[in-house]
Amino acid sequence: MPGCTPTGVGPGTHGRVFVGQRREGFAVNLGGVFDTLHFTAGPNAQGITDVIGPQQQGLNDVGNKNVTTIALEVPASCLVNAGSTVIGAWSTASVRQARVINPTATFGQPAREGGPFVQVSRLGMPLVNELVIGLPDKDRWNTSEPKDDAQWDKYFTNPTLPFVVAAMFGGAGVSEPQLFPRGDLEQIFNTGIKLSGINVTQISANPASAEMLRLNTAFGQPAAAAQNSALGALGCFDNPPATAGTIATLNPGGHADCDTAGFPNGRRPGDDVVDIVLRAAQGALIDTTDAPSGGCLHAVGAVGGPTTVDAPGPGGCLPIVDGAATNATTFLSVFPYLNPPLGAQ
């Protein structure tokens, strides 16, 4: 790479780029989640997500799609500086400011566009605009930059989503966390995580709010089995204590399902980010007094997780899901990691 001589890698290791069609690796119950949780609680015959049921309910709306992929593989030493091993990234989409119908339209030019490019969307952490930012500000947030994110703090410290989930599924034992402001969500999304004396994803000391996807490149490669953990870095925590006003202890060496480089420390293609975000929003990291039905940190059947679906796990946690599971073992083990497009020979 221009201006960088990689360190800590094998001889001849360079950055790589792939641009082309790949099979969609993301899994989401698109209609159910984006329609503000059009779910139910408990088994049903209508094909609607059982929000406390199995992770895999066959409700992935994008699993049979192809996407245009831009994949970069870059040596970590070319991305970090001497002051921090944590990197942050976000993307934006922009369109021309003006667009008019082409009176002599062709297939290749149905409209005529001009003027400067205007940002209409941004993406760092998944589902922020869809599930966290309030309706009056969704368009404004999409046109903003992370450096100005302090103006959106209220949506993270006092989120609406947990209230909505509790209102819809209170009959199944779901309740809203009562620890405010929600410092756990502020760290996960906006400032980076520093817990139990371990700096996970904070780029600098006393960071300001700036929503982006962060990765601590110093954590190294976890065991292969841990890399296949669908709940990513949630498995790196002990289950929350009962003492009010506290949060779960980070214990990376204490759990076989701990992926130290899993979401929200980075994001692997096989991470079930929808379930992770839903569980975190419901208080997965918060003490069981303030969040008696917080989302479970460990999968059903895993050590520390619930023994069965549609029932509380340790400390009363609930296995909050969208019914569209990922399977990390199905991805390629080599760059660009996403599978070839459907229909390819």
Image: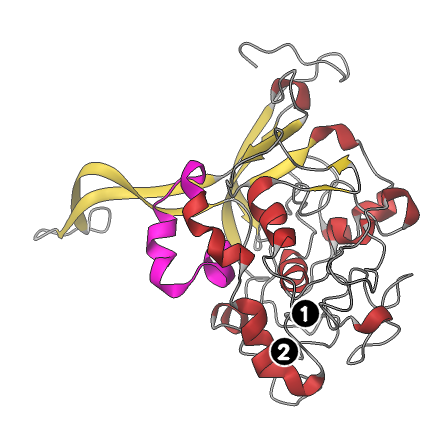
Left or right, residue 154 beside residue 119: right
- Callout 1 amino acid: Val
Left or right, residue 84 beside residue 2: right
Q: Are marks 1 and 2 in contact (CB under 8 Å)?
A: yes
- Asked whether 9 or 106 is in front, the reply is 9
Left or right, residue 17 beside residue 76: left
Give residue 290's quadrant in the image: bottom right
Query: Where's residue 134, x and y in %?
Result: 42, 62
Left or right, residue 91 beside residue 64: left
- Callout 2 amino acid: Thr
Please give the name of the residue rendered at 48% of the width and 68% of the height, measured from the top-left corner. 34
Query: Where's residue 10, x and y in %?
Result: 77, 16
Answer few, some or many: residues within 10 Å of disc 2's Cα (few below 14, many 20 plus, some between 14 and 19): many
Q: How many marks?
A: 2
The quarter of the picture where the N terminus appears is top right
Q: Which mark is residue 53?
A: none
Compared with 249, 33 (above or below) is below
**Secondary structure at numbered mark 1:** loop
- Write down the region rendered in magenta: 128-149
Q: Which mark is residue 321?
A: 1
- Of the two numbered discs 1 and 2 on the same chain, state the one appearing first in sequence: 2
- Asked whether 291 or 266 is in front, the reply is 291
Is any atom of residue 25 visible in this view? no
Our reading of the magenta stretch's main secondary structure is: helix
Instruction: Point out the residue furthest to the left here.
Output: 103
Find out whether residue 202 is within the magenta segment. no
Is any atom of residue 326 visible in this view? yes
Compared with 48, 150 (above or below) is above
Query: Where's residue 90, x and y in %?
Result: 50, 39
Find out whether residue 134 is within the magenta segment. yes
Compared with 175, 189 (above or below) is above
Q: Which mark is residue 49?
A: 2
